[in-house]
Image (tube, helix red, strand yellow):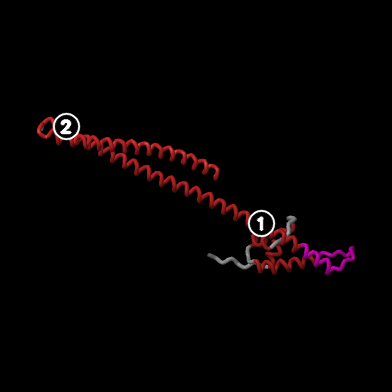
Amino acid sequence: MLKRPPITKEAVFAAADHIMDQGLVPTQRAILRRCGGSYSTIATFLDEWRKQKSATFRMSDSGVPDKIVDNLKLFATDLWAAALEMADAGLARERDDMARDRKVIMGDQQDARDLIDRMDEFAATQESRIRELEREVRDLGSLNASHSEKLSMLNERVTDADTRAKNSEDRIAVLTRELSQASRQNMDLVRLLTQMGKSVKTTLRRAS
């Protein structure tokens, strides 16, 4: 990258004249924005420009000594420049505050997205568990059917088969209750995710 040449006195003088022609007070910040350079260099040239400008104006009709007039003009110019510098600093602080607020809002939005992702993962886990329970119910149903068939074929094992069938039925009842509970939890989770999705969309619309 090419190094930018240092600012010259002529450039500072020209920028100061242009700013003053617009009815504004030349400040270090204003000249820095127009020409670049460094504050120390601009301050030196700008002070020289102010002295030259003060030397071009005289208040001969007022009877006030030129030295006092020059000092008053320099004081007024410096005072106005200081006021502008303070105003610029205030605006900079406001911009920083707005940037921080935006960062906080974006952080809240990201937290909401992360929560939704975790809830999606939990819902997927619940759905997987429900499928497992359904498979177990089907398997136990098949086992119960097999037991029933064996009962019809093997009368001598009626007592043992009845016991196994009863155990299978109990297990099916337990699994059915678990499946019903998991289904209710999944429905509650779906309603929660729907509400959170609406809330996030509202938050995103407000932030934008």
Circle 2: element type = helix
What is the crowding at mark 1: few (fewer than 14 residues within 10 Å), some, or many (at least 20)? few
Using residue 35 as the reference point, say whether residue 128 is left or right of it: left
Which residue position holds label 1?
Answer: 90
Q: Who's the residue at 87% across and 66% down the image?
A: 64
Distance (Cα) linking label 1 and label 2: 87 Å
Q: Give x and y (percent) for residue 187.
A: 39, 36
Front in this rendered view, residue 82 or 174: 174
Front in this rendered view, residue 39 or 204: 204
Q: Who's the residue at 29% across and 35% down the image?
A: 176
Q: Give x and y (percent) for residue 118.
A: 41, 47
Q: Give x and y (percent) for residue 185.
A: 38, 39
Which residue position holds label 2?
Answer: 148
| Residue type indicated by callout 1 | Gly
In this rendering, which labeled residue sits more in front, label 1 or label 2? Answer: 2
Q: Main secondary structure of the magenta part?
A: helix
